[in-house]
Amino acid sequence: MSDTLFFAKLGHNRELSKLELSILMEILEIQRKSTFFEFKNFLFFTLPKELEKEFFSLINKTGSIVKVGKAVLIGKKKDSLFKIKKNFEAKLEQIIEQRYKEIKPPMKIALNVHCNLNELEDYSSFTKTIIRKIANEHRLSINLRRAKKISFELAPAQYYREKFSKKGVEISVFKIKSKIYIGKTIWVTNPNKDILLDESRPVRFFTHGTSIKVARSMVFLSKVKERDLLIDPFCGTGTILIIGLLRNCQVIGIDIDRNCINAAKENIEVLRKKGHVNTDSHWELYNADVKELSKLLKKKADAIVTEPYLGPFLKRLPTYEKGKDIMKELERLYKQAFEEFEKAIKKGGRVVFVIPEYNYRKKGIIAPDINKIIGDTSFKLQTRSSYFNVSLPIKIGRKHNVISRRLLITEKL
């Protein structure tokens, strides 16, 4: 059985998206000889057909991937223009007819063309002409979505607002060097779910808490499974715990700040009442120092996922000397934390952890020393992804923030 070619649109943080896709490939145990290549902000890769269903169940759990579709190669530079046009029309006809049978007319069509700028107008006009020809020949009632520009790509919010998952199809044309591909969108991340989840939480602190999207990515990178025990030892207002509960994990949150524990408790309870989290989900919260972690546990964790204390809240960078002092202090805290993590987690368990860094343009970047933090433990730091050539730790968060953050993954040997 031949493999299927997929394309994934990567998020703003392309390396994080590729890292999540790499973890997905690991979970599916895809052979490393699987074909993949990048084009603009898309990653193309092949998958065995028998794994497609499991692939789409996993992609729903990621946080940074924008959309996924299937693609087909329809022509190469050495092919005749007649053959390319014939294949082009046949594949478009197949996509449109198949989708038309699944929905009530009129069917909406969004068209994306990805190629060199000097070829964009030609490919867009050519594709639109063929779509209209197919619609006329088969008497299909379609609405080819108009665009202000030559090519238009639906943002996820637009995709769901215009109900494309029920009423339309998004077609993509890729001209990559000498090859032409046609594809259709299969899955799009739904930002409305994140907004609903975020607005449903009654307590949010500006200085505490990880964003829902980043938390979802971090939990996915931990490879945690249903019924596994997930721990966040710097839980803040409980965002990572909530994502864990949505994955049907058992969760334990710890924080030294009593206000954070109260906030996390209130957030979880409200989400349970609103039906976002299963009422029978197991969760525990402790107002304690991370140094007490191993003493609080009845059994060892399957994964630890956390964005720890990153130092004092800053509106601007501190002096270089002050910055070094802050990082040394954090280094000591994180070293103590990893000593506890070693006692608290199973062999093979992952720790997904965030560290801060200050960027002084002339003097360079300062950050806690990762090797000193995990040096005396049995944790191994991941430095490269298994697929797609991602170097770790990777930057996360917004570029304009005073504090940059790097996400690292370690595994207990």
Image (spheres, helix red, strand yellow):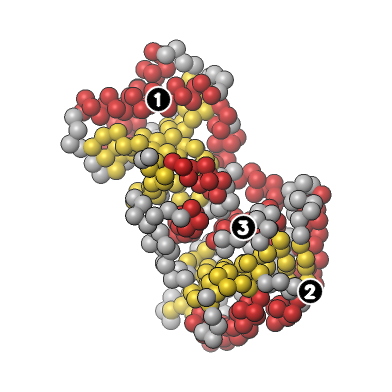
Q: Identify which residue is drawn at 66% across, 65% down.
A: 230
Whether residue 339 sits left or right of residue 155 in the image: it is: right
Q: Measured from the top left, where is residue 330 in percent x and y?
A: 60, 81
Q: Identify which residue is drawn at 46% across, 42% down.
A: 50
What amino acid does circle 2 point to?
Asn
Residue under pointer 3: 225
Mark toward the start of the polypeptide (1 vs 3): 1
Residue under pointer 2: 287
Residue 82 in sight from this viewpoint:
yes
What amino acid does circle 3 point to?
Lys
Please, is residue 68 above or below residue 333 in the view?
above
For the residues labelled 2 and 1, say whether their Cβ atoms are less than 8 Å apart.
no
Q: Measured from the top left, where is residue 4 in percent x and y?
A: 39, 41
Q: Measured from the top left, where is residue 369 in percent x and y?
A: 50, 82
Q: Measured from the top left, where is residue 342 in percent x and y?
A: 61, 79
Q: Identify which residue is drawn at 49% across, 25% down.
A: 99
Question: Considering the numbered disc 1 on the image, is that residue within a helix, a strand or a loop?
Answer: helix
Mark toward the start of the polypeptide (2 vs 1): 1
Distance of mark 2 from mark 1, alpha carbons?
59 Å
Residue 14 in sight from this viewpoint:
no
Taking the view exactly as shown, the residue that stands out farthest to the front is 1
Residue under pointer 1: 94
